[in-house]
Image: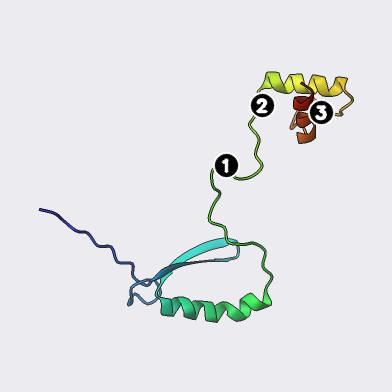
Amino acid sequence: MAKKVTVTLVDDFDGEAAADETVEFALDGVTYEIDLSNKNAGKLRADLKQWIEAGRRVGGRRRGRSAGSGRGRAAIDREQSAAIREWARRNGHNVSTRGRIPAEVIDAFHAAT
């Protein structure tokens, strides 16, 4: 016998209507999600409108980082790090004995080798 399972999202605010959308908002550094009917989502947006208009936008819509996004570089091992530092010193670059090697130095090393 086949079974059919139906999941119905219920409006988190009033518990009455079916939820049509998930609304995300943040306050005091905490991000919240609430499932709302179109009617209650509109009411929430209308209630927040005056506060949003008086505030400053500090970010856009963020839905998490996708794989491969950002500048990111592959980590370098100790041997390669030591070789880059040695090359940099011989070629007039100022690098510390420990810590992160500036990207410009790494790029110059790769361009020269």
Residue 29 image point, x, y percent: 60, 61
SS type, badge 3: loop
In the picture shown, does residue 109 fall above or below 25? above
> In the image, is 90 to the left or to the right of 23?
right
Residue 108 image point, x, y percent: 80, 29
Crowding at mark 1 (Cα within 10 Å: few <14, some 14-19, many 20+) = few
Q: Give the farthest residue toward the left.
A: 1
Which residue matches tag 1? 68
Report the Cα–Cα distance between label 1 and label 2. Answer: 17 Å
Cβ–Cβ under 8 Å for marks 1 and 2: no
Report the Cα–Cα distance between label 3 and label 1. Answer: 29 Å
- The residue under the point 48% across, 81% down is 43
Which residue matches tag 2? 76
SS type, badge 2: loop
Residue 96 circle label: 3
Which quadrant holds residue 105?
top right
Q: Nearer the viewer, mark 3 or mark 1?
A: 1
Q: Earlier in the sequence, mark 3 or mark 1?
A: 1
Q: Amino acid at mark 2?
A: Ile
In the picture shown, does residue 81 fall above or below 56? above
> In the image, is 64 to the left or to the right of 59?
left
> In the image, is 79 to the left or to the right of 4?
right
Report the Cα–Cα distance between label 2 and label 3. Answer: 16 Å
Q: Quadrant of the C terminus?
A: top right
Cβ–Cβ under 8 Å for marks 2 and 3: no
